[in-house]
Image (cartoon, rainbow, N blue to C red):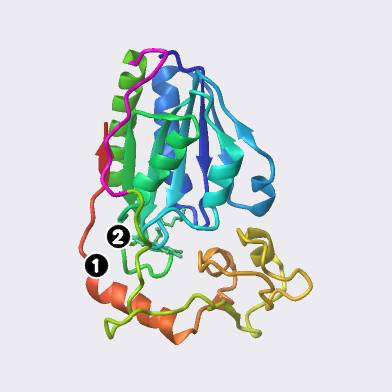
Amino acid sequence: MNVTKITLLYYSATGNTEKVVSAIGQKMAECLQVPCEKADITLPGNRLAALEFQKGDLVIAGMPVYAGRVPNKILPYLQEKIEGNGAAAIPVVTFGNRSYDNGLKELQHELELHGFHTFAAAAVPAEHAFTDQLAKGRPASADINRIRKFAKHAADMVKLLPENITVQVKVAGEYPAPYYTPLGTDGQPAVFLKAKPLTDPKKCDGCGICVKVCPMGSISEENPAEVRGICIKCQACVKKCPRGAKYFADPAFLSHVAMLEQNYKRRAEAEFFV
Ligand SMILES: Cc1cc2nc3c(=O)[nH]c(=O)nc-3n(C[C@H](O)[C@H](O)[C@H](O)COP(=O)(O)O)c2cc1C
């Protein structure tokens, strides 16, 4: 197949997924000698317009795994606004060292359903948005080296594919599948759906960065301490606040984080599918 352009299509609230798809895209663009552009759908303003692709396009589609699946507030955009029209695609998920469960399979399913042909895929562990005690600092250089090897292999493969691709890569996971139920340290479901970030008034200087980085557009411009809309617990405001003013104090949320720290510190490895 003759690839003419690579597009990195991704949602990445805390930057891990962007790093991973960029590493894949850069290497593939170098191997295939084609341009690589970004379609970053993290912010709500970037999810308004529809995106149409065509044959000759290669889309590297990246999502973090939330509760074992594709983030449920981003899924409708994939379902309603994106059409592959025969483009090739590589579904990629990042996950915070616990498990990617059925997230990669779901992403592949949605891409195939909307006109993409998925011939390779990857699930990559990355620092957990909830705590730096899981996969701290990853993807690190050893991960990036493996990712680049995969990208080289995928570039060699795509050249050998026919113009009318029929293959579909086999990936781990089930579709359909339920969401993962977060547990607390007591082994019981930790219900923190309504938890929202708090703001330390001594640290917040009202700069408004949190307002701009919230993927749901939920933080009030007039008063950044107020979360008016829904909170998906993505941690963008917590991680991107230059003064460390945002934090979560919800007991069920903190219990889930403690449970993760107790049980999921072992090293998870990336999985590549071709
Ligand atoms: C709401 C939420 C749910 C998550 N659920 C999972 C999960 O089920 N399994 C897992 O291993 N990591 C989970 N994570 C961790 C993220 O998948 C991981 O940190 C990811 O790399 C974040 O991507 P980003 O930096 O591109 O936003 C979750 C993170 C958030 C914010």
- Mark 1 nearby-residue class (10 Å; few <14, some 14–19, many ≥20): some
- Residue 79 percent coordinates (x, y): 54, 44
**Quarter of the render that holds ligand 1:** bottom left
- Amino acid carrying label 1: it is Lys
Residue 172 point in image, percent of width and height: 26, 45
Q: What element carries label 1?
A: loop
Please tell me whether the stretch drawn in magenta is mainly helix, strand or loop. loop
- On screen, residue 37 above or below 96: above
In the depicted structure, whether residue 134 falls above or below residue 154:
below
- Residue 86 higher or lower than 139, as above or below: above
From the Cβ of disc 2, is ligand 1 less than 8 Å away?
yes
Which contiguous range is marked in magenta? Answer: 161-174
Q: Residue 265 carries which label?
A: 1
Q: Pick whichever of labels 1 and 2 is earlier in the sequence.
A: 2
Q: Position of residue 108 (x, y in %)?
A: 39, 40
Q: What residue type is labelled 2?
A: Asn
Which residue: 34% across, 45% down?
105
Q: In which quarter of the image is residue 112?
A: top left
Q: Which is more toward the observer, 78 or 226?
A: 78
Q: Residue furthest front?
A: 176
- Drawn side of residue 43 relative to residue 172, left or right: right
Q: Name the residue under label 2.
A: 97
Q: Where residue 89 appears, x then y in whole percent?
A: 43, 31
Q: Is mark 2 on a helix, strand or loop?
A: loop
